[in-house]
Image (cartoon, grey):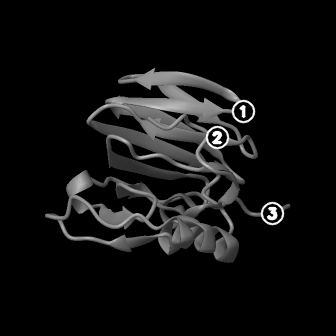
Amino acid sequence: MSAITIPAPLIRNAADAERRWFYGGGIVTWLAKAEDTCGTFLLSETEMEQGKVTPLHTHPADESMFVLEGEILMHMDGHESIVRTGGLAIAPRGVPHAFKVLSPVARVLALHTPGTCEAFYMGASEPIGPDVVSGPVDFNRITASGRENGGFELVGPPPFATD
């Protein structure tokens, strides 16, 4: 019989959480990392600007995205839907998905279960200070981190029509 590891209690305010610039575009606030949860999940809030788009990709973990503010266009498994404030999108592991920010700003709470994608996100981002609101977008860095760390597989370009 294997021993069950139980995470320690955690209380973390956003002001105390690690903030990173994600090279796919957006500021990620890490509310719970794998070390906090014994690898059971990752929880982050990402703030993004209008027009931010992801390529079509998959993760080896389930990704649940709850829209705290704004509106995104979610492309999942060949279908597109608008997800507005208060809405939820769940991309099961291995399902191709992408999204585009439609509103001037979008804030999304992302839950990855299990917490196996953390190395990818750390490799595809940099720590930032409290006054930073933007940074460079570099999809080559995103792809390289996925190749080196796992946690992300590029399966195609952004599937959205160009404006």
Q: Which mark is residue 2?
A: 3
> Are the residues at dot 1 and dot 2 in contact (C-beta closer than 8 Å)?
yes
Label 1: which secondary element: loop
Judging by the rendered image, the residue that carries numbered circle 1 is: 77
Amino acid type for the residue under numbered disc 2: His
Q: Which mark is residue 97?
A: 2
Q: Position of residue 155 (x, y in %)?
A: 72, 53
Q: Position of residue 61 (x, y in %)?
A: 68, 50
Q: Quadrant of the C terminus?
A: top left
Q: Residue at x 47, y 44 (%)?
A: 110
Q: Is residue 35 left or right of residue 144?
A: left
Sequence-first tag of 2 and 3: 3
Quadrant housing residue 101: top left
Relative to residue 59, is residue 126 depicted above or below?
A: below
Q: Is residue 133 left or right of residue 33?
A: left
- The answer to whether one can see residue 160 in this image is yes
Q: Residue at x 47, y 60 (%)?
A: 8
Amino acid type for the residue under numbered disc 3: Ser
Q: Is residue 82 left or right of residue 62?
A: left
Sequence-first tag of 1 and 2: 1
Q: Farthest front residue?
A: 163
> In 3D space, how far apart are the residues under numbered discs 3 and 1 (Cα atoms)?
37 Å
Q: Quadrant of the N terminus?
A: bottom right
